[in-house]
Amino acid sequence: MSQQATLAGRSAIVEVFDSFRDELDEHNDRRERLIKSSRDVTNLSKKVIFLLHRIMTDDASPEDQDDRKRAARAVIKGRDKLKEIQNMFAGFSHEVKGDRFWRYQRAVSPGLQEYIEALSFTHYLDTGRLVSYDEVQKSLSDNEGNQYFPLPLEDYLLGLSDLTGELMRFAISSIPHRGGRAKANEVCAFVRNCKADFEIFVPHVRDLRKKQNVTSQSLEKIEDAAYTVAVRSSEYDLPPEMLDDLVSRTVSSVHGGDGGGSGRRKRGREDDHDDYDD
């Protein structure tokens, strides 16, 4: 073989490996962009959840005890913030067009699940029920109905499962307010039904079993708070205002101000992001 043919062969091989290098660089750069976008979605989704809690409980004054009005105000502000997140999804949708989405699904999943949690909490305050799969997918589409990317069923279920922790915080925080004891019982029944309905999917969805364990803990906290309130309330013949004050002190002493105990879950989701930094 002549020297010229040898050099031509080497050049062809170098070109092939150069294309491999460019493809890997493009893949890593796209993954990093998606991870960053997913973190931004996660952070903004958390802010939406905190906003909803603040409006429904922390900001409730003695003159603002109408639960329906507070819920309507929370839903309006929550949906405005959710539109910002939807615009973020639209902004990186070109990165995950077609089958490419499934290659980068793990990079997008943490933010997507947090968004579903925020969306489902807003939807619950608005309607008192779970947001459907089709409703979530519609929120991830443009005005013409074109999907930014397909919604994985496992991300939908895991996001809904995380909702139960926020409902626990909502129920316990609501107890001291007028009508809060009835609201806590209502939320307790809702969370119990969610746990039962999700159980059928446990063998088919990775990580759902761990989420179900957290849901069980959340349900137990709501039941403990409701039981404590019922027992203490029966001991006193007091006007509703004084009884609410007693309930508030009781809840604070029992739960030590822990409105949710969801810090480990939040930390865990940030750890999911860190898995992609390797």
Image: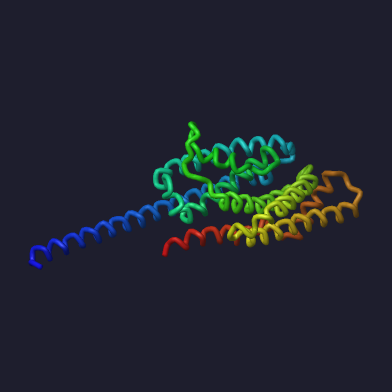
- Nearer-the-camera pick, 151 or 47: 151
Q: Residue 76 occupies which quadrant of the picture?
A: top right
Q: Quarter holding the C terminus?
A: bottom left
- Nearer-the-camera pick, 3 or 264: 3
Q: Is residue 117 left or right of residue 13?
A: right
Number of labels in the image equals 0
Instruction: From the top left corner, tell me how far across and down residue 114 is, in percent.
Output: 56, 50
Instruction: From the top left corner, tell me how far across and down residue 203 is, in percent.
Output: 64, 60
Among all residues in the image, which is located at the extreme top?
A: 144
Instruction: From the top left corner, tell me how far across and down residue 16 is, in percent.
Output: 24, 59
- Nearer-the-camera pick, 11 or 190: 11
Among all residues in the image, which is located at the extreme front?
A: 1
Q: Residue 82 occupies which quadrant of the picture?
A: top right
Residue at point 50%, 34% (across, down): 145
Instruction: From the top left corner, tell me how far across and down residue 172 is, in percent.
Output: 73, 52
- Nearer-the-camera pick, 18 or 2: 2
